[in-house]
Amino acid sequence: MVFARPPADRNEALRLALLELADDHLVLSQRLGEWCGHAPTLEEDLALTNLALDLLGTARTLYATVAEREGKGRSEDDLAMLRVEREYRNLLLVERPNGDFAHTIARQLFFAAFMRPFWERALASKDEVVQGVAGKALKEMRYHVRHAGEWTIRLGDGTEESHRRMQGAIEALRPYLDELFVSSEAAQAAEEEGVLPVRADIRPEWEETVSDVFARAGLTMPEWPHPRLGGREGFHGEELGHLLAELQYLQRAYPGAQW
Amino acid sequence: MTQEAATIDRIPEDALLRKAWEAAAAVPDPEIPVVTVADLGILREVRLEDGVAVARVSPTYSGCPATQLIETAIAAALEKAGFRARIERVLSPPWTTDWITEEGREKLRAFGIAPPERAAGKRALFGEGRVACPRCGSDDTERVSEFGSTPCKAHYRCRTCGEPFDHFKCI
């Protein structure tokens, strides 16, 4: 059985750390893309697909870098389209299904509130590619946070029904939040080398952003003593398999197809 | 980003280099064809390396679907001008709307797109600057959506003349 094995050496660890990030971005991008043609308004349809494009752009640069450094002749497409779910190393949070609009917005707020300070610190990365990606992604994450934050407030502070749904989405996603701040063996290697920022250090800033939004929205963050982990080791919910089936369908059905 | 950054990294000196720069610089943006890649500041540099014209290009947004098309168009323009061409994608320093030239800003405005404000930077979590209507000049405008017809534009409406318009987002 194929699975996300731990790194064999330092160089592989550094590559896998970038692969984890790439997977986070691709999977969340695909989730947002599922809203295309289904969002509550035309403006929101455009917004969600715009956000998806930003994430896809970041994922592509990271995949291309991993493929090049690996030197096995694989391409960014091979990494995205030909790995099975147990080889995907994304956070469980990003693969959570879209649910209602409140679920999508909550997931987006939690992710963007983490990635904004993450990229801000990554501007000082010793890796040139990470530095370059960080410069672009930071600007984008600022408006991702704004977009999700504005909606969270609108829904949390809206009608009784919108508040109930927003609070419900937060509670449904709460078990998946601690994984944001956990570094895998690969990520730890990258953190030691000054390639990526230390994930645990980002928690205070993340909490500040989220509680600022929640205070304005009249929402509360429940306690959750049992974090759900495992995404980085390839242990995913069944939902990821469905997502990949759609994402990879063409390459699976017609291997090597190009257009 | 300082004003200097808005100019090309190296002013072309000899005629050949100038020819290459001019060919590449004239390529229009595929989605906003009134401005060129030089107006937008995404063409960072053109240099000659062993007879190959190397154009360095910065993408606007990470996932801008026009990036690849722009690179292909610049390579084609260089080849048409008689050069062998190569494109280098430059991520760092990241492109900012501050690199759009004055001329580019005017062209955008004349086309009905409100140009980005100067000095892109860190904005507060919420709140935004005033955007003037490109048609009547009024400051009394409202944002309909932060996401418009392309990744780089937001959708606005003027309360004075009633016209909807695009705003080139400031990043």
Image (cartoon, coloured by chain):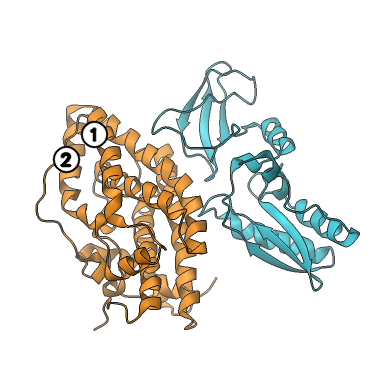
Which residue has dot 1 on it? A214
Residue at image point 81% right, 68% down: B83
- Left or right: B96 with respect to B28? left
The tag earlier along the polypeptide, 1 or 2, is: 1
Q: Tell me, yes or no, if residue B23 can be seen here.
A: yes
Q: Picture coordinates of residue A223 (x, y %)?
A: 11, 45
Residue at image point 27% right, 51% down: A98
Report how many numbered discs are placed on residues in the image.
2
Q: Picture coordinates of residue A170 (x, y %)?
A: 19, 43
Q: Quadrant of residue B90?
A: bottom right
- 1 and 2 marks in contact (CB < 8 Å): yes
According to the colouring, which chain is cyan? B
Which residue has dot 2 on it? A221
According to the colouring, which chain is orange? A
Q: Crowdedness of circle 2 by 10 Å Cα count: few (<14), some, many (20+)?
A: few
Q: Quadrant of residue B106?
A: top right
Asked if A117 appears above or below A86 in the picture, the reply is above
- Left or right: A217 with respect to B106? left
Q: Tell me, yes or no, if residue A50 can be seen here.
A: no
For numbered disc 1, what is the local secondary structure? helix
Quarter of the image that includes the C terminus of chain A: bottom right
Report, in whole angstroms, how far the alpha carbon at label 1 lies from the one at label 2: 8 Å
Question: Quick one: B19 or A160, which is closer to the camera?
Answer: B19
Q: Picture coordinates of residue A54 (x, y %)?
A: 46, 52
Q: Crowdedness of circle 1 by 10 Å Cα count: few (<14), some, many (20+)?
A: some
Amino acid of disc 1: Phe
Q: Quadrant of residue A30?
A: bottom left
Asked if A208 appears above or below A93 in the picture, the reply is above
For numbered disc 2, what is the local secondary structure? loop
Quarter of the image that includes the N terminus of chain A: bottom left
Q: Picture coordinates of residue A200 (x, y %)?
A: 26, 54
Amino acid of disc 2: Met
